[in-house]
Amino acid sequence: MSEESELKFCSACGALLEIKIPEGDTRERHVCTKCGQIHYENPHNIVGTVPVYNGKVLLCRRAIDPCFGKWNLPAGHQEMKEGTMAGALRETKEEAGAELKNVCPFMLLDVPFASGTHIYFIGDVVNPDCKPGPETLEQRFFSEEEIPWDKIAFNSVKRALRCYFSDLKKGSIGFHYEIKEKPGKE
């Protein structure tokens, strides 16, 4: 149960919610005091891509908070009724104006303390002359040596970048799974 949950009223009937373990369940849930509707809170998927062109990665400098002005892989929240890859490709088009080919799963990073999962796909940029969207101040292709590591927006992005450049050196791009149990540095 999320401590910072803002659920107060039932979306079915408008009555107050209480936190309790429903019959047959094992976890606390928000339950309507009038109609009994159970309101589930579920983790959030962050979906994105590692867009590659000639061994360099396309990063976007954020025009929005959090982390305004920092560099990020194109990524964002998966929408309802949207697949993870479709969401990642949508975010890449919206933020970087880029289309990808040869797309495949690259990294799954579980972040249970934040009730989230970060899912990255990797793919080749079709046209390097892509134009960023309104959530991006600028974008650029970076080699490993050019990455502004101290100006990367999120630890999950650092992890994905480190995995990509490590794989590149090995000559084989693999799939990576990691779990981050607590907040803090990578």
Image: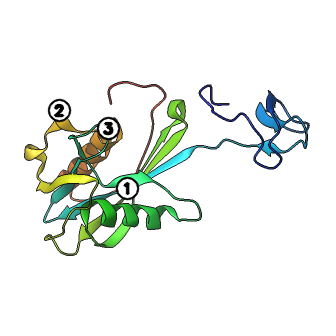
Give the image quarter of residue 122: bottom left
- Which part of the image, by quadrant, shows the C terminus? top left
Give yes or no for contact between labels 3 and 1 (Cβ–Cβ under 8 Å): no
Q: Secondary structure at mark 1?
A: strand
Q: How is the image coloured?
A: rainbow
Q: Secondary structure at mark 2?
A: helix
Tell me how far mark 3 sits from mark 2, CA to CA: 10 Å
Q: Position of residue 142 (x, y in %)?
A: 12, 52
Q: Amino acid at mark 1?
A: Gly
Tell me how far mark 2 sits from mark 1, CA to CA: 20 Å
- Label 3 vs 1, first from the N-terminus: 1
Give yes or no for contact between labels 2 and 1 (Cβ–Cβ under 8 Å): no
Residues 91 and 155: in front is 91
Which residue shows up at 38% across the image and 66% down it?
89
Answer with left or right where residue 13 lies relative to residue 68: right
Which residue shows up at 15% across the image and 70% down it?
128
Answer with left or right where residue 89 lies relative to residue 123: right
Disc ID at residue 150: 2
- Label 2 vs 1, first from the N-terminus: 1
Q: Position of residue 185 (x, y in %)?
A: 32, 26
Which residue shows up at 75% across the image and 47% down it?
11
Give the image quarter of residue 132: bottom left
Q: Residues within 10 Å of mark 3 (few under 14, many from 20)?
A: some
Q: Residues within 10 Å of mark 2 (few under 14, many from 20)?
A: few
Q: Secondary structure at mark 3?
A: loop
Which residue is tagged 1? 48
Q: Position of residue 165 (x, y in %)?
A: 20, 49
Which residue is tagged 3? 154
For residue 49, above or below residue 86: above
Q: Amino acid at mark 2?
A: Asp
